[in-house]
């Protein structure tokens, strides 16, 4: 298929509108909310009212009818403005995509409008204490009962549960304990009896928190099952490929912000009667970062286009490449921006040191760079597995 190297005028206009909204809030708003233990509810709500959160949800359910590339553009522009919304990666991207593709008509009508306008926020849980990248080891189990299902198990490093009305849970059905993973997906209300969660103490200062979840004989009705009981890997990756595309866009927005700060400082900071940006020791690393960002953006756009075209395996390959490239780009961007600022790079005033831990996370989550490299080695190069 042909991949365009320029975005449509509609997407460029979307970017401009989102950038204007992001500028209205900015990095100070985000930092103040995070340090005060507050949420970015005002930004989330306004983004929802403007149709930005639901841009990739079908029009018949209140969305914009676009694709994952449009939603990724929204995510990137908000991050570039200094007000990233992590739950965009989870709620409209992962959960919204899975429901739109595999939900029943009744589920779509009941759930998608709230996801589209931001009045509903859903979390997604797959990772377990003993099943991180190796999702085949998931032991959270759903037992069939006369009136529905009973879930038991534990999940960890799950984002935004305290803001969500429901959690989309990846579980095994009882007869799938052995053999290859055939996940079943259940939408569990966060106020369900037997469902509890505990915040994980993280070093990253962010409005969005991470949690360990406990399912102690949580009962849900038959209608909580999204898609088929043994839908398998295809249904799961309907959400995980968009997750990688969104994570890449999230990282790219942060990288753009770091580069913008470094470039502006390099123009204004004068040493020995010349702006420090005139020195190649400063200008070359920043130019290199610009190149890395642009390359990662192209791969992210390619992944989004392939996914929208329904080319699942090539989309998975490109999404892993994009996630890897963006993770490297943002880590380099923040590191070089701090170096450009010298000691000021570690001063809170300049807003870079706060990005350090978050940018480093891009090499780890939602999939580590090593697992992305494994996918490319095995799928693209045909190399044997080591696991």
Image (tube, grey):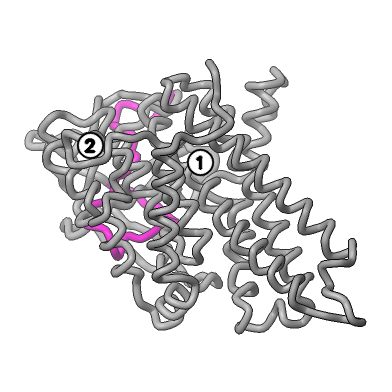
Of 178 and 37, nearer the camera is 37
Q: Position of residue 63 (x, y in %)?
A: 23, 41
Q: Secondary structure at mark 2?
A: strand
Q: Secondary structure at mark 1?
A: helix
Q: In percent of the image, x 31 and y 62: which residue is there? A: 44
Q: Which quadrant of the rendered structure holds the C terminus?
A: top right
Residue 45 forms part of the magenta stretch: no
Q: Earlier in the sequence, mark 2 or mark 1?
A: 2
Q: Residue most toward the left?
A: 147
**Quick check: 149 left or right of 245?**
left
Mark 1, residue position:
244
Q: Residue at x 19, y 53 (%)?
A: 189
- What number of labels is visible? 2
As drawn, 111 above or below 39? above
Q: Which residues are magenta?
A: 152-179
Q: Residue 94 occupies which quadrant of the picture?
A: top left
Residue 303: x and y in percent read 53, 31
- Foreground of the two, 118 or 219: 118
Q: Identify residue for label 2.
A: 143
Indicate the position of residue 35 as horizontal and vertical percent values.
45, 81
State whether residue 344 is above or below residue 173.
below
């Amino acid at each position: 298929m042909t991949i365009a190297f320029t975005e449509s005028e509609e997407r460029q206009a979307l970017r401009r509108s989102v950038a204007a909204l992001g500028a209205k809030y900015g990095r100070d708003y985000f930092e103040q909310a995070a340090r005060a233990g507050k949420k970015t509810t005002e930004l989330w709500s306004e983004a929802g009212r403007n149709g930005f959160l639901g841009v990739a949800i079908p029009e018949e359910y209140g969305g914009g009818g676009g694709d994952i590339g449009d939603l990724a553009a929204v995510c990137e522009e908000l991050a570039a403005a200094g007000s990233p919304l992590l739950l965009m990666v989870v709620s409209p991207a992962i959960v919204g995509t899975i429901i739109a593709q595999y939900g029943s008509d009744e589920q779509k009508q009941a759930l998608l409008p709230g996801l589209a306008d931001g009045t509903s926020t859903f979390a997604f849980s797959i990772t377990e204490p003993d099943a991180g990248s190796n999702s085949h080891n998931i032991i959270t189990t759903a037992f069939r009962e006369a009136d529905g299902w009973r879930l038991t198990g534990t999940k960890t490093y799950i984002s935004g549960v305290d803001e969500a009305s429901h959690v989309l849970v990846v579980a095994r059905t009882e007869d799938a304990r052995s053999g290859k993973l055939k996940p079943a997906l259940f939408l569990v209300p966060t106020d369900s009896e037997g469902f509890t969660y505990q915040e994980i103490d993280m070093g990253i200062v962010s409005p969005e928190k991470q949690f360990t979840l406990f399912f102690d004989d949580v009962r849900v009705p038959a209608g909580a099952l999204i898609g088929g009981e043994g839908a398998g890997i295809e249904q799961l990756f309907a959400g995980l490929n968009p997750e990688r595309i969104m994570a890449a866009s999230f990282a790219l927005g942060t990288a753009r912000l770091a580069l913008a700060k470094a470039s502006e400082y390099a123009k204004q900071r004068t040493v020995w009667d010349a702006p420090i940006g005139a020195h190649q020791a400063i200008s070359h690393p920043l130019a290199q970062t610009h190149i890395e960002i642009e390359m990662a953006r192209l791969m992210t756009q390619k992944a989004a286009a392939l996914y929208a075209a329904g080319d699942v395996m090539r989309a998975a390959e490109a999404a892993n490449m994009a996630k890897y490239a963006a993770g490297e780009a943002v880590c380099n961007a923040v590191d070089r921006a701090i170096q450009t600022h010298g000691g000021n790079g570690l001063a809170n005033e300049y807003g870079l040191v706060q990005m350090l831990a978050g940018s480093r996370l891009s090499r780890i989550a939602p999939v580590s760079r090593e697992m992305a490299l494994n996918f490319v080695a095995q799928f693209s190069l045909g190399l044997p597995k080591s696991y």
